[in-house]
Image: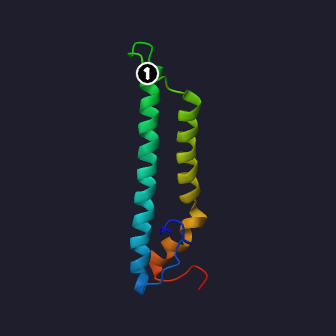
Amino acid sequence: MTILDSPIGSSPGPHGADAEAQLEMVIEAERTRLLRADSLLGCLQIALDPDAPVILPEVHFPDTVEAVRELVAESIRRLDFFQLRKLVHQVLYGGSPTQ
């Protein structure tokens, strides 16, 4: 289990120090996921270019598009404000928003 699989903001820390590190990890993980999606889209763009050389084996476009959509959807889910709100509150104020 990684930090991203655990409930956001579940690790206690003085004045949000652990929460700040966790927030940085979450943001960096999502940047990495979005960079992968961008790379896949770049490959798809090249593959769809009629002037590009033929790629063998041929690219199966629906699988490529599905992979990109899954990466983006997962980032959208993980970056949802309600998922991050508790962690951001810990970073800013050192406690849970429900306290």
Q: Residue at x 48, y 80 (%)?
A: 11
Residue 6: x and y in percent read: 54, 71
Q: Residue at x 43, y 71 (%)?
A: 22
Total count of labels:
1
- 2 vs 55: above or below: below
Residue 98: x and y in percent read: 61, 82
Judged from the image, the secondary structure of the residue bearing numbered disc 1 is loop
- 37 vs 1: above or below: above
Which residue occupies the foreground of this view, 52 or 30? 52
Check the image and name the residue furthest to the front. Answer: 57
For the C terminus, the image quarter is bottom right
Residue 26: x and y in percent read: 45, 63
Badge 1: residue crowd in 10 Å (few <14, some 14–19, many ≥20): few
Q: Which residue is mark 1?
A: 56
Q: In the rendered image, which quarter is residue 43 located in?
A: top left
Q: Residue at x 54, y 27 (%)?
A: 60
Which residue occupies the foreground of this view, 3 or 1? 1
Q: Residue at x 53, y 40 (%)?
A: 68
Which residue occupies the foreground of this view, 63 or 87? 63
- 98 vs 63: above or below: below
- 14 vs 19: above or below: below
64 displayed left or right of 98? left
